[in-house]
Image (cartoon, rainbow, N blue to C red):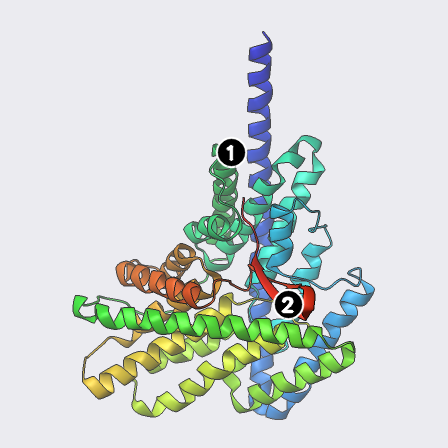
């Protein structure tokens, strides 16, 4: 009798967790999709105004960063958003670092950062907001508290799914970056949230981000795709080091106004001379795809300038108080890197490589090296391409990139922490994973 009672209670709790995950997935999709739609609308409006008056750029980032600072001070408990670290602390340290106010905090700060020119994306803002939805759902029912990690992962996986219409990438992101739990209940919760989010997005918000045609790839191009993977790993480390340096530098500034004014001026100056650095950069990627149709050596210098400045612009944005991460910048950098490699190889060696293929492979490879999550990157870019024709070369380049990046610098921006040691030295330690 007691055994039957235990089984009934266990099954009830399983059903409760799965239902909570489904609700989390729905609300996460609504948060992610509305943030995506609103951001895209206002980013396009601001860019249109900048085409008529370029000098507006010298006040736009300042307005955005100042507004974020004021919102934090007056509405959001005067606590800075720490991005993915907040989610990792919640999972790994069993800490209550995702209160309900983190949902609007990251939502609005991510929106304001991107539409006012901050050179990053809304992905991390979305991930933390949707993870906070999962944490909130675990607090609403007492016996769900022990399943907080499952619901937090369900929320963040649903957020990534909604942003990119990529359910497999959403599931793998939770597994590769946050927790590697293999329990059936954990898997069921994440899968349920991902499916709920996917259905909401697919039927009510779906819009293909990029439009391009991938038809085939040749096996003789594989060595050059491996070369692209190596270069992507190097660029990933460059991006990571830039972000860590700027966060440390701006964090050392005691005066908030000096940080905001100095950061916004640097962002404005870079965007004034290189407009493709504005916002998340998806317009820049579309421009790269257009150039990929008929690439010439003349495009190399502008592409190289963008390739070198994008990590700096992203890092300054985050260091100066913007809300975001390295998802969109990595895709942006990878697209430019892929086109550069293809054009150079075709021009000097007459290889006849397909530019669009290298653009896509570069996107996946740089993202893989930046977040140390190759399988997330593989399925995310395949979802963006809306086909799996390049699956094998994307897998190879992404794994090579992650290996190269980890060999040079074994931390991503998510797993790196700075601790003051005796003698004033700085030690780096990775975040643990259960």
**Residue found at x 49% / y 36%:** 188
Residue 262 in view (yes/no): yes
Left or right: residue 365 versus residue 7 is left
Q: Secondary structure at mark 2?
A: loop
Local packing at callout 1 (Cα closer than 10 Å; few below 14, some 14-19, many 20+) is some
Can you say whether 171 is above or below 211 in the image? above
Local packing at callout 2 (Cα closer than 10 Å; few below 14, some 14-19, many 20+) is many
Q: Secondary structure at mark 1?
A: helix
Find the distance from the CA under tag 2 to the CA under tag 1: 32 Å
Q: Nearer the viewer, residue 235 or 72?
A: 235
Where residue 124 appears, as percent x and y from the top left, is 57, 61
Where residue 237 appears, as percent x and y from the top left, is 47, 71
Q: Which mark is residue 185?
A: 1
Q: Nearer the viewer, residue 425 or 81?
A: 425
**Residue found at x 67% / y 82%:** 264
> Which residue appears farthest toward the right when viewing the image?
74
> Which residue appears farthest toward the top when viewing the image?
1
**Residue found at x 55% / y 34%:** 18
Residue 115 in view (yes/no): no
Q: Which mark is residue 166?
A: none
Q: Quadrant of residue 266?
A: bottom right
Q: Earlier in the sequence, mark 2 or mark 1?
A: 1
Q: Nearer the viewer, residue 424 or 348?
A: 424
Locate the N terminus and report the quarter of the image it occupies.
Answer: top right
Left or right: residue 127 versus residue 249 is left
CB-based contact (under 8 Å), mark 2 and mark 1: no
Residue position marked by numbered label 2 in the rendering:
323
Can you say whether 193 is above or below 58 in the image? above
Where residue 31 appears, as percent x and y from the top left, is 61, 55
């Amino acid at each position: 009798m007691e055994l039957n009672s235990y089984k009934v209670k266990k099954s009830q709790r399983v059903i409760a967790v799965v239902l909570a995950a489904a609700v989390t997935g729905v609300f996460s999709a609504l948060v992610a999709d509305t943030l995506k739609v609103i951001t895209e609308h206002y980013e396009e409006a601001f860019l249109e105004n900048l085409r008529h008056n370029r000098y507006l750029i010298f006040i736009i980032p300042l307005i955005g960063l100042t507004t974020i600072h004021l919102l934090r001070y007056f509405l959001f408990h005067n606590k800075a958003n720490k991005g993915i670290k907040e989610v990792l602390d919640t999972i790994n340290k069993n800490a209550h670092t995702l209160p309900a106010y983190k949902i609007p905090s990251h939502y609005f700060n991510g929106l304001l950062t991107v539409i006012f020119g901050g050179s990053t994306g809304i992905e991390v803002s979305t991930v933390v907001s949707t993870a906070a939805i999962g944490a909130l759902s675990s607090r609403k029912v007492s016996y769900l508290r022990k399943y907080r990690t499952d619901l937090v992962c369900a929320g963040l996986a649903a957020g990534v799914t909604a942003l990119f219409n990529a359910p497999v990438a959403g599931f793998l992101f939770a597994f590769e970056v946050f927790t590697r739990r293999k329990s059936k209940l954990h898997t069921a919760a994440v899968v349920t949230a991902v499916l709920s989010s996917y259905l909401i997005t697919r039927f009510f918000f779906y819009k293909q981000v990029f439009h391009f045609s991938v038809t085939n790839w040749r096996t003789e191009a594989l060595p050059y795709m491996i070369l692209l993977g190596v270069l992507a790993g190097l660029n990933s480390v460059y991006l990571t080091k830039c972000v860590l340096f700027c966060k440390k530098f701006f964090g050392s500034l005691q005066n908030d106004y000096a940080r905001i004014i100095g950061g916004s001026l640097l962002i404005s100056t870079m965007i004034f001379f290189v407009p493709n650095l504005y916002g998340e950069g998806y317009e820049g990627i579309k421009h790269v795809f257009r150039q990929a149709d008929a690439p010439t050596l003349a495009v190399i210098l502008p592409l190289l300038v963008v390739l070198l400045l994008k990590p700096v612009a992203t890092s300054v944005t985050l260091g100066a108080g913007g809300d975001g991460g390295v998802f969109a910048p990595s895709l942006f950098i990878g697209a430019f890197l892929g086109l550069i490699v293809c054009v150079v190889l075709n021009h000097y060696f007459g290889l006849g490589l397909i530019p669009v293929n290298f653009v896509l492979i570069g996107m996946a490879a740089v993202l893989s090296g930046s977040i140390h999550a190759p399988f997330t990157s593989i399925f995310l870019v395949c979802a963006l391409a809306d086909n799996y024709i390049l699956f094998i070369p994307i897998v190879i380049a992404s794994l090579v990139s992650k290996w190269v990046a980890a060999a040079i610098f074994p931390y991503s921006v998510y797993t790196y922490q700075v601790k003051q040691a005796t003698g004033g030295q700085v030690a780096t330690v990775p975040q643990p994973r259960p």
